[in-house]
Image (cartoon, rainbow, N blue to C red):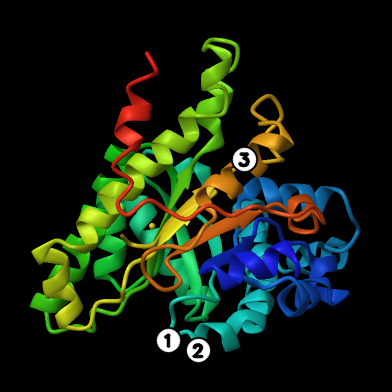
Amino acid sequence: MKATQRLHDAGQSIWLDNITRAMLASGTLARYVRELSVTGLTSNPTIFDHAIKNSHDYDAAIREQTAAGKAGEELFFELALADLRQAADLFRPVHEATNRVDGWVSLELSPTLAYDTPGSVAAAKALYARANRPNLFIKIPGTREGIPAIEEAIFAGVPINVTLLFSREQYLAAAQAYIRGIERRVAAGLNPHVGSVASLFVSRWDVAVAGKVPPALHDQLGIAMAKRTYKAYRDLLASDRWLRLLNVGAPARRRRRGGGARPLRARGRRRRCPGRRAPARRGRRVRQVLGGPPRLPRGEERDAPEGRLIDPRPLNLAPHPADGAESGRRHKNFP
């Protein structure tokens, strides 16, 4: 059995961390869905920059849009949305079969809005409307300025993928923003079923402490932080505040690891970040330790760079601890 199928059967949702027009046109993405159990996709400006500048697949569309007077970010988002609409349609059957839990694609806001809360909210609403796909997340960073934007976007009914989360504290701030947005929708008589996911970056921790910790702690900090965040996620799922929202129709929360409540997803190795790369073995270690069956059905998503997705090597899956409590002991080993 393929490693990707084993992850899928263990309750993990594999989201591809890449998109190109060639991947769509050639049927490669459809094959990944069919043969490698891929159930979602993420993107960011770096991914699209790589796709556009390293192929001629976008040239005709660029000429057409330029002739129509579009340039800069407006042109970029036209190209990105065209690809993501196709991908969203490909994942739509998964989205419907899982009652809107899986089958998502993600579009990130412009980095120029990183410190602009009102601008982020306006852009999230506009891009989601332009995409016109129910299974498209807008990615907002879980930063100081991003947290209030997340709440406002959720209140407006825009599904959000919270990115750039590195710690339990960041995760909880993002999760609370999501809950506030849903609570406001309930109070206003609006449908509380607005999807969201939290993206936890794991291997960046080990990159940051590489060469600064004893060998016994190599490749351990990211996992400890992920388990620490997992415990916070589990505690939130069991809270009275969240259970009240479930009773009125809020979507059940999941995690993303890779990179949440809101689903938490974990992000492992990011291959498009020169200078920040974690060795391939580290990404594999993350999958082995964090890839086992969750305590709730289909409880997590994880990003898979394309090279790791087709890795033929076997994978040993370890079950999650009941609540992640032992992570606190591991975390204390680090200065």
Q: Residue furthest right?
A: 56
Q: Residue at x 23, y 84 (%)?
A: 191
Tell me if 238 is positioned left or right of 232 in this view: left
The residue that mark 2 highlights is 96
Q: Is residue 278 left or right of residue 102?
A: right
Q: Residues within 10 Å of mark 2 (few under 14, many from 20)?
A: few
- Name the residue type under label 2: Glu
Q: Is residue 166 visible?
A: no
Camera-side residue: 139 or 123?
139
- Residue shown at 29% from the left, 79% from the top: 193
Q: Earlier in the sequence, mark 1 or mark 3?
A: 1
Point out which mark residue 285 bears: 3
Estimate the spatial distance between the alpha carbons at disc 1 and disc 2, rounded to whole Å.
5 Å
Name the secondary structure under disc 1: loop
Q: Is residue 96 left or right of residue 276?
A: left
Measured as percent of width and height from the top left, residue 73 is found at 60, 53
Could you tell whether 90 is left or right of 99 in the image? right
Amino acid type for the residue under numbered disc 1: Asn
- In the depicted structure, whether residue 297 falls above or below residue 16: below
* Residue underneath mark 1: 99
Q: Does the image show residue 152?
A: yes
Provide residue 181's location: percent of width, then percent of height.
Answer: 21, 65
Seen from the viewer's position, the closer of residues 163 and 320 is 320
**Mark 2 residue element:** helix
Mark number, residue 112: none
Q: Nearer the viewer, mark 1 or mark 3?
A: 3
**Badges 1 and 2: C-beta atoms under 8 Å apart?**
yes
Q: Residues within 10 Å of mark 3 (few under 14, many from 20)?
A: some
Q: CA distance from mark 2 to mark 3?
A: 33 Å
Instruction: Name the one closer to the observer, 305 or 216.
Output: 216
Which residue occupies the foreground of this view, 130 or 253?
253
In the rendering, at what x and y percent does residue 7 appear? Answer: 61, 64
